[in-house]
Amino acid sequence: MSWFDLSGKSLISETDWTKEEMDNVLRVAKQLKASYYSGDPTPVLEYKTMLMLFFSGSTRTRLSFEAAMTQLGGHSQFLAPGTMRLSLEEKPGAGESIKDTAKVMGRYGDGVGIRLLDDQIDYYGQGNEVMRKVAEHADIPVYNMASDVNHPCQSLTDMLTIQEKLGKAKGNKIVLTWAYSPWVRGRCSIQGTALISSMYGMDVVVAHPEEYDLDPDVTATCEQEAEKSGGSFEVSNDMDEALDGATIVFPRNWYTADRYEIGKEKELEIANKHQDWIYTGKKQKELCDPGYFLHCMPVDRGNEADHEVCDNELSWMYDQAENRLHSQKAVLATTMK
Ligand code: CP
């Protein structure tokens, strides 16, 4: 198979693409990163436009996609839904429909990125539903820039970082642990990293207090992918036990399955019972081997992780943030062309 087969493909969930397709994109990401550091221009998307629709806030995703399009010779347009005609309500009188907005976007752009999650949705799964609807009508690739369920550009980046740092992912133990934060965060980054780590044959452990099960569909897919890849997938309700011998640790807050039924205040009450769920330098030294710190950022310092693990030599988070740029250039270059 050639990587050119990705032309026109959307990326909404990690499992939209096969492992082989992910491999090809990661290979392109490494080539584009090498070109960037060699000072060789890579204007493969000259005159192409990426439309970026941000319902929710962002630092890394917006910056990295904009820089990516610049480095590929194209242009990106930042779109704030509040300045447009679009309504997600889909009823007479509410505003312009998703279908009409998508059809028009397809006439101007060569790809659409969408971020839709957290307080901007009414129920779990809505972010992905809207993205799939845009993809159905836009006739150009749609990129999930973070939804309530998945964050494929982040998880591809995590895999790029793991491969760069360790040579290969397979056989390494990665612990994705719930961590306390009053931010009441979505599940997309954890679920995305769980999916891609399972696809790549890692020994994946998801640790969380009892209330914080991941989406059962995601868990079932991780189990199937781990079986196919020769990795393993386990769930633990004991953080210290899970950290035992961990090569990589990703500590991240996420909300319960009932987030959109019970509201944020009730979520916070539940989270407040588990303030001891924090990844610390002490746990890293005493339990892990060596416990490299993986984090999609923004990190809630002092809650999800202490300053020591954020800043010591085992922290990968800034290199990981940089890699968003190179992995997304690969996604854009292989799908828009
Ligand atoms: N990791 C990530 O998506 O960061 P932002 O929310 O800042 O875009």
Image (spheres, grey):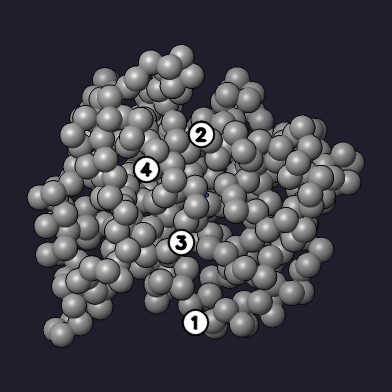
Instruction: Say if residue 7 shows up in the picture.
Output: no
Is residue 334 or residue 72 the one in the foreground? Answer: 72
Q: Earlier in the sequence, mark 3 or mark 2?
A: 3
Quarter occupied by the N terminus: top left
First of labels 1, 2 by sequence position? 1
Tell which tag, 1 or 4, sits nearer the viewer: 4
Give residue 323's mark: 2
Residue 141: quadrant of the picture: top left
x, y percent for residue 173: 68, 35
Give the image quarter of residue 207.
bottom right
Which one is closest to the eye, mark 3 or mark 1? 3
* Marks 3 and 2, how far apart at CA: 20 Å
Q: Amino acid at mark 2?
A: Asn
Q: Label 4, on which residue?
A: 66
Q: Which residue is painted at 26% across and 57% down in the image?
A: 132
Q: Badge 4: few (under 14), some or many (20 or more) residues near its Cα, within 10 Å?
A: many
Residue 57: give its label. Answer: 3
User: Tag 1: residue type?
Assistant: Glu
Nearer the observer, 258 or 316: 316
Q: Secondary structure at mark 3?
A: loop
Q: How far apart, in angstroms, are the residues tagged by discs 1 and 4?
A: 35 Å
